[in-house]
Amino acid sequence: MRSKSAAALAGVSALALYSSVAVGSKYNLPEPQSVIAKDIYDQHIMLLWICLVIFIGVFGVMFYSVLKHRKSLGYKAANFHHSTAVEIVWTVIPCLILVVMAWPATKTVIAMKDTSSPDITIKATGYQWMWGYDYLQGEGEGISFFSKLSTPRSQIENKAPKGDNYLLEVDNHVVVPVGKKVRIILTANDVLHAWWVPALGIKQDAIPGFIRDTWFTADKPGIYRGQCAELCGKDHGYMPIVVEVMEAGEYSKWVAAKSSAVKTSMHVEN
């Protein structure tokens, strides 16, 4: 009994250690920064552990059978007969595993589609090869701008060392307040694009002539980077997305400054 308890405790400890290390690993999903992203990350880890247990069980039995029951040791091939009970067991168990995997995934997918009652609505339009943003609702309503790659050409042409955020820099960030529900309405002006920010758990296609939407609520201030995730032409790799999350007070200052700049620009044009 003690050995079983120790083994269980060791397993739980190993899982906790793995999860904490994996969050910061470049080989895993980025650290989640929203409720949806956390759900995606937790389910990703859970499914990996389920797959690992199945892998060890199946291949463990297979290799044990090959090594311990081989012909050279005097064993003869088994002569199995039909067993309804066995067939029921190996049908029911995979079904139960699928239900365990599908139940939380379904709840997360439903939550991802719930874009109701947003605090801020932003329209994102994909172009070859940049993004256009229009703040349609909430604080900042009326703000519009384009967001283009700002990585220096010298880095792209290998005439200068690559920066820390190579090809993930833009001239205008999408700025939102922390803790607010942000709805992103997506479309495209030319070909298929996709708005993808992994840390926020967002990936939605932008389709010409159609309106799609998604949402997120950022947990803490910071800068979160993404990219266009649909092959959209020769400069597909030059369509980064940068979301900057600010505290409420800083966001209000940004809105005031941006609105003032827009009004000044309109006055100059007139």
Image (spheres, helix red, strand yellow):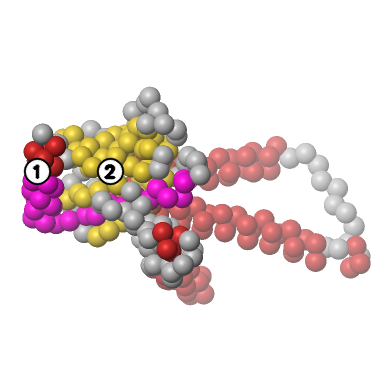
Identify the mark at residue 62; answer none if there is no mark: none
Q: Is residue 186 magenta?
A: no
Q: Which residue is mark 2?
A: 146
Horizontal relation, residue 256 to residue 16: left or right: left
Q: Which residue is mark 1?
A: 264
- Crowd tier of the residue under label 2, counting other residues whose Cα lies within 10 Å: few below 14, some 14–19, many 20 or above: some
- Crowd tier of the residue under label 1, counting other residues whose Cα lies within 10 Å: few below 14, some 14–19, many 20 or above: few
Residue 157 in the image, given as x and y percentages of width and height: 48, 61
Residue 268, by quadrant, is: top left
> Going from the N terminus, do you reach mark 1 or mark 2 first?
2
Residue stretch in magenta: 235-262
Q: Label 1 vs label 2: CA separation? A: 17 Å
Q: How many numbered discs sit on the rendered protein?
A: 2
Residue 147 in the image, given as x and y percentages of width and height: 30, 47
Amino acid marked by disc 1: Thr
Horizontal relation, residue 176 to residue 112: left or right: left
Residue 66 in the image, given as x and y percentages of width and height: 80, 62
